[in-house]
Amino acid sequence: MIASQETTPCQEVVNCSLCRTPVSFFCRRCKINLCDSCIPGHLRVKSEFGHDVVDIGSKDEDDSCFCDAHPQYKCSAYCKTCDVVICIFCISIRHKLHEITELSSNVELFKRFSREKDRLQSFKNEIEPVLNHTNKLLSSFSSIYQKRKDEVSARGEEWHKQVEKTVKKLHQMLDDFKKENRTALQIQKTELEDMIGKINEICKKATKLQKANDIKEMQAFWSILKEKETIQEIRPYTFPSFAECQIDENYLQTYFGYIEKIPEQNVVLTERKLEYDVITDKRILQVPTVSCVIDSGFPPDEKYNARLYDMAVTDDKKVWVGGHSRELKLFDLQGHLHRTVTITCTGIYICLHNKQVVFSDNLKKAVKRVSDDDTVSTVFETKAWNPFGITSTASGDLLVCLRKDDQSKVVRYSSTGTVLQEIQYDSQCQPLYQWAWNIAENINGDVIVTDFKRNAAIAVNQSGMFQYSYGGEKRASELSSVTTDTVGHVFISDFRGDKIHMLDQYGKFLRYIIPRGERIDHPRAICMLDDDELIVGEYLSGLSKTIKFMEEQK
């Protein structure tokens, strides 16, 4: 039997545990996947429990119940004294003088009954630490919020009467967050306590029925045990932080500071542990600085004198740069050139996808990929639409800005080019974009697009519903590229204003990032190196500049 590699967009290939090729079989006793060629070798491996190789589709259809003490033997009896199913070997040794009953046809009920009870007990063990943490948050609640108020007040004293109105406003925001958080934590505490109490009652009843060996009652109680729901996600509530900024009369909101509510996201209990670090240990630098400069070396465009268009940062903090030539270049942060790849168009729009460079080819109306051996291949074609900005997503998809005539839209593609979603109109069937230019995905799933004609950044959620718009008025600014960090901040390069706009995840303006000393000139490309540093590409000079704008709190 040869395993098929065909998959749907929502399906992943299951690989052999030994050689990573597509799987066909499963060994129930060893709990591993096997391909055709690995079965003979696996069967030759000695195991005290033996092997039971079945078709992969039948892996979950095993009706056997094996003894915990002697896994090589099937269970054939139930010990009332010890409340456990046992094998014939156990009867003659450990349970010789105990009260024993035969399992016979009820073995499957015992097995399913125990499995569901264990599931609930395991879930209870997972959420009890969450309840403990919720109680700890409540105990330190007032002191943490008072500390934040003290920070705001201390900053306000420096500004005296000029900032009194701002201080009161921020106090009110903290009080609102405090009230909101307290209510949410109290609700969570009550829900968790109630849930654990109900689970205890069910498990107590289940244990009593097992000891009584009352099959009829167990069958009647089975639906209650089976259908008892468990939650899959827990929200770890966090506290807001106060971020101080440099005092400047021209930028009151930018340099005084702001209250930032740390994004709260549901955490799938089975996938990762809750992160309980609720207070950030970083703050924005009063004076952002340029820490290093890379010269891309691209020639100038004859019409606009442009040199550098876009950038993409690799996992090991190297930078792919696209400019006015049919080449992509890979630099390290010290400015050393590591690779040069010849492509089929100018590198105006690029991103990293599965650790490889992907770019929009306007000439061929296609999205293309650079492989590890520097060959260029077409991922998919965009047909009558011209591709512009492109970005990869947390789910492994590609988001592409497309334009045709006077229409513009964003399309989500799978890694093989299947169209998964189109974003073009708002809830009133009006166009969201006039010219979707550059694009980024935020940590909360929002899709943020800079619109060339509207001179604005437009955000929609994962479903394509409008969330907010930023800009669109000041002609002293020209919003170009966009990127985000791991806590949801949005950063937009201002081509005409020679600065970076910093927003929160809801589109609220926080501050400008304007480095002192070595300024940034006509910034276009922008990427995150980490949550402390940005790298900005200058359109006319061809230079890439790393800007440090965060530091550890002392």
Image (cartoon, rainbow, N blue to C red):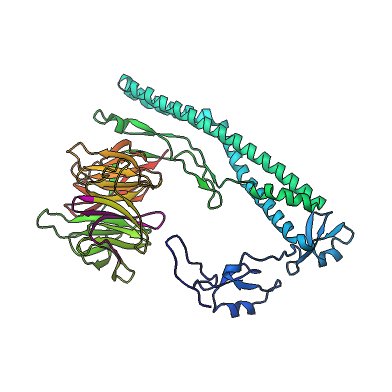
Give whichever of 32, 277 is nearer the camera: 32
- Residue 107 is situated, as x and y percent measured from the top left of the image, at 75, 61
Give whichever of 373, 297 is nearer the camera: 373
- Residue most extreme to the top: 161
- Residue most extreme to the left: 303
Is residue 387 highlighted in magenta? yes
Which residue: 72% across, 48% down?
Answer: 221
Main secondary structure of the magenta stretch: strand
- Residue 514 is situated, as x and y percent measured from the top left of the image, at 25, 40
Left or right, 192 with reference to 409 = right
In the image, residue 476 above or below residue 32: above
Q: In which quarter of the image is the C terminus?
A: top left
In the image, residue 70 above or below residue 163: below
- Residue 428 is situated, as x and y percent measured from the top left of the image, at 30, 40
Is residue 371 highlighted in magenta? no
- Residue most extreme to the right: 97
Q: Is residue 118 in view?
A: yes
Q: Is residue 536 in view?
A: no
Left or right, 385 with reference to 87 = left
Left or right, 266 with reference to 48 = left
Q: In the figure, residue 496 lies in which quadrant?
A: top left
In the image, residue 61 above or below residue 225: below
- Residue 413 is situated, as x and y percent measured from the top left of the image, at 35, 58
Span colored in magenta: 379-407
Left or right, 450 with reference to 230 = left
